[in-house]
Amino acid sequence: MFEFHPYFTNDGSVGLYSPEFKDIYHSTTGALTEAYEKFIMPVDIENLLAKDSIKVLDICYGIGYNSKSFLNLILENYFLKISQKNNKHAKQYIETICTNNNSEKNNNESVSNYSMCTETIDTHNIFDKIYIKSVDIDKNLFFLSPFVKTGVKNFKNNNFDFEYKNIDKYLEKEKIKNPKKIHKLINFVIFEKIIKKYPEILQNEDIIAILDSKRYNSYFDSNLKGIYEFYRSERCKCTLLKKISTSLHNIYYQHVSNCYKNDLKRYNLRDFSFDPQIGDARDIIKNDNNLYNLIFLDAFTPAKCPCLWSYEFFKLLFEHLEQDGMILTYSTSAAIRSAMKEAGFFIGNIYNERLNKYTGTIAVKDSAKIIHSLSEFDLGLLNTTAGIFYRDENLTSQNEAIIERRNQEVKNSDRLSTSKYKKNFNKIL
Ligand SMILES: C[S@@+](CC[C@H](N)C(=O)[O-])C[C@H]1O[C@@H](n2cnc3c(N)ncnc32)[C@H](O)[C@@H]1O
C-alpha cells in the first residue's frame, strides 16, 4: 500500500519521508532550495541555452523538484531577459516567478493575474529544444508531483506521522528568507503531460484518496486539485445527480484551466518534451539511446540505495553523457566519487554560496568543466576503505546484496582505514 508522509521543509516546500527506505526524500533546509543549490545553480545555463537541443535526465524524480526547478530557471532566465528589454508585462511577472516575495493572494486573484498579459511572446526557441526524461520507481509520486506546494509562508508542522531522528529539531532551525517558488504554469504543464502519458492517474484510488483527504489539504495547490476533479468528471460517465452537483465546480475550474492553457500558449511553455518513465532507473537507462547534457542523480543515500551508486551504474551513465555534459549529485561520499573516477569521469565539488561550503559532486568527461577541484585530503580518501565502491555487475542486484558484498570487501581489504588516514593526514598538517 502506498504511504504518504508529507511535512513542510524550512523554505515552505513539501518534503516527504519514506518508511521503506527509512529516509527523508529532501533536505529539511528546504526541498526546493536543495534542488536549486545542488542541481540547478552549478549548471552553466548560458552555455546550455546556446545549444540547439538540451537533454536532461532526472534520475529519481520523486515529486519532481529537480526537473521543475530546471524549467523554472529557464522561465526566470527568459523573463529576466525580457524585463531587461523593459517589457512591462514581464516586469509584473518576474517577482512572482523568481521568489516568494509577494504574499500569497487568494486563488481567484492569482488566476486572473496570470491572464493579464494579452500579447503573445515568442519563446518557442527556448522550450521546444528541451527534452527532460524523468525516472522514478514510484508512480504515485509522479502523479502527486504537480500538486505539491512551494514557497508557503507561516506553515505549521505539528503532526509528524513518522519517526525520523531529530526531524523536529532540524525544522526548528532558521527558515529560508525569500525562498524560491515553482511557477504554477510549470506544475500545470507537468500535470497535463503526465495525464497524457498515464491517463490512469485520473482513476488512481491512492491519488484520489490523498488529494481528497482534508489532512493533506495544506500541502497541495487547490486550483490544480480542482482542475484534476474537473478532468475526472469530464472523463467519467457520471449519473445525472452527480453531474448537477459538480456542474458549478466544473464551470469555475474549466475557466481556471482555460486561463492556464492560454498562458501556456502565450509562453510556449508546453513546447518542451517531458518523458516521465516509471521503473527501475537501471532498466530504463539501459534501454535508452539518448546522450544527455545534464544528469541529475538524486537517489536515496548510497548506504540505502546502492544500486544507483555502483561503479557499473556510473559506467552506464558515462555512456549516456555528452562529451561536454555534467552529472550532478548531492553525495560527497568517497565510495561514490571513486566509482565515478573508475568509470572514467573527472570529478569536482559543488560549491554552495549560501553556506560557503561544498555540498555535492559533479562528474564530467571534460576536465575544463570543473571549477572546484577536490582537495588533496578528499583525493587521498578515495584510496582508503571509504573509497571502496559498490558493485552491481549485471545492474540487476538487490540493494541488500550490493551492501553485503561491499561490507565483505571492506572487511577483507588491506587498504588504509579511513580513521588512520585522517589521523595521519592531521599529523602531517
Ligand atoms: C531522494 S528521493 C528523490 C527526490 C526527488 N528528486 C524529488 O524532487 O522529490 C529518491 C527517489 O528514488 C526513487 N527510487 C528508489 N529506487 C529507485 C530505482 N531503483 N529506480 C528509480 N527510482 C528509484 C524513490 O522512489 C524516490 O522517489
Image (spheres, rainbow, N blue to C red):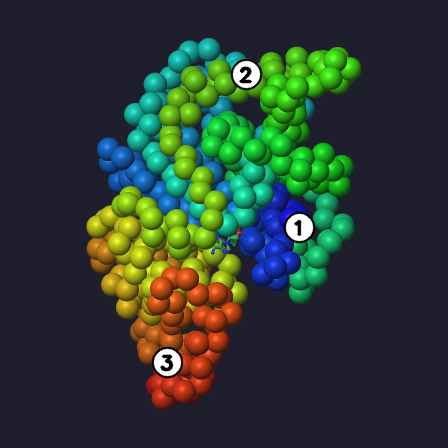
Label ID, residue 156: none
Task: Identify the image quadrant of residue 393.
Answer: bottom left
Residue 104 in view here: no
Q: Amino acid at mark 1?
A: Met
Q: CA distance from mark 3 to mark 1?
A: 41 Å
Q: Is residue 2 above or below residue 314?
A: above
Residue 210 in view here: yes
- Residue 38 at what x, y percent from top left? 44, 52
Q: Is residue 422 above or below residue 402?
A: below
For disc 1, the marked residue is 1
User: Measuring 51% from the left and 59% from the top, which residue is drawn there?
Assistant: 300
Q: Earlier in the sequence, mark 2 or mark 1?
A: 1
Q: Earlier in the sequence, mark 3 or mark 2?
A: 2
Pick the quarter of the image with the C terminus: bottom left
Q: Amino acid at mark 2?
A: Cys
Residue 98 shown left or right of residue 268 in the figure: right
Look at the numbered discs 2 and 1 and tell me whether their residues touch, using CB distance below 8 Å. Answer: no
Q: Amino acid at mark 3?
A: Thr
Look at the numbered discs 3 and 1 and tell me whether their residues touch, using CB distance below 8 Å. Answer: no
Label ID, residue 384: 3
User: Measuring 38% from the left and 62% from the top, which residue is drawn there?
Assistant: 395
Residue 36 shown left or right of residue 343 in the figure: right
